[in-house]
Image: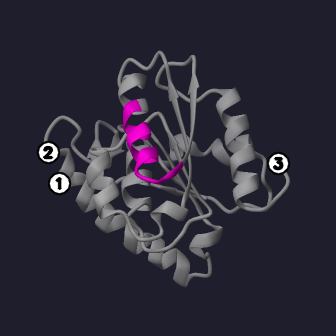
Amino acid sequence: MIVLHGLGDSMAGYSWVPQALKFSWLNYLLVNAPDEYYGGFSWYDYAGDAATGVRRSIGLLHPLLDAQRAAGFPTGQTILSGFSQGCLMTLEAGLRYPHRFAGLIGLSGYVLDPQTVLREASPLAKEQRLFITHGRQDPLIPCYQVKEQMDQLRAGGLALEWHEFDKPHTIIEPEIELMRKFVAQAMGREA
């Protein structure tokens, strides 16, 4: 499982994920974004030209994914996941990647433009399994806007599982429990 953090955070902020998921059989790769941001890191400039930074970060993530394949971690047995900016990068990079993942998990994020993602998606994107969550009380990324985007992706043929929670811009226990079930199912294991 590859884990991508949100704006201003780092891989250290997600060191709790292995303990929370409780899968002793799963390897985890926590990744720092490329740009420094107030003591943490950023995948793109959300306040400026986000598209340029997103494309640059896709260009960094795809070689990382290729390196994992070369190291003996098949994409079909890999979950790509992320929170907030990491969610956006999971969807933007994962749907364009030319190999099928076991699953894509996006928590409290969005895509830049659903129609661009659908147009540029790899031929395997419609075979990807997506697990997406969002908070109805998210003050940073309004839930209704993300739901509209996800509805567009679903209408474009993507297999997308959507869950809303009564939460702000964070990750909560019921969400983790559903995520555990998704990961186990995607990997053909017991939850």
Q: Is residue 35 left or right of residue 22?
A: left
Residue extending farthest to the right is 190
Q: Are marks 1 and 2 in contact (CB under 8 Å)?
A: yes
x, y percent for residue 184: 76, 53
In this rendering, does residue 86 appear at all? no
According to the picture, the residue beneath numbered tag 2 turns out to be 49
Q: Nearer the viewer, residue 3 or 55?
A: 55
Residue name at image x 47 percent, y 71 percent: 65
Q: Earlier in the sequence, mark 3 or mark 1?
A: 1
Residue name at image x 57 percent, y 81 percent: 71
> Which kind of residue does numbered mark 1 sit on?
Thr
> Which kind of residue does numbered mark 3 sit on?
Ala
Q: Is residue 7 left or right of residue 191?
A: left
Q: CA distance from mark 1 to mark 2?
A: 6 Å
- Range of residues picked out in magenta: 148-159
Residue 48 falls within the magenta-colored stretch: no
Q: Are marks 3 and 1 in contact (CB under 8 Å)?
A: no
- Quadrant for residue 112, please give it: top left
Residue 52, label in figure: 1
Q: CA distance from mark 3 to mark 1?
A: 39 Å
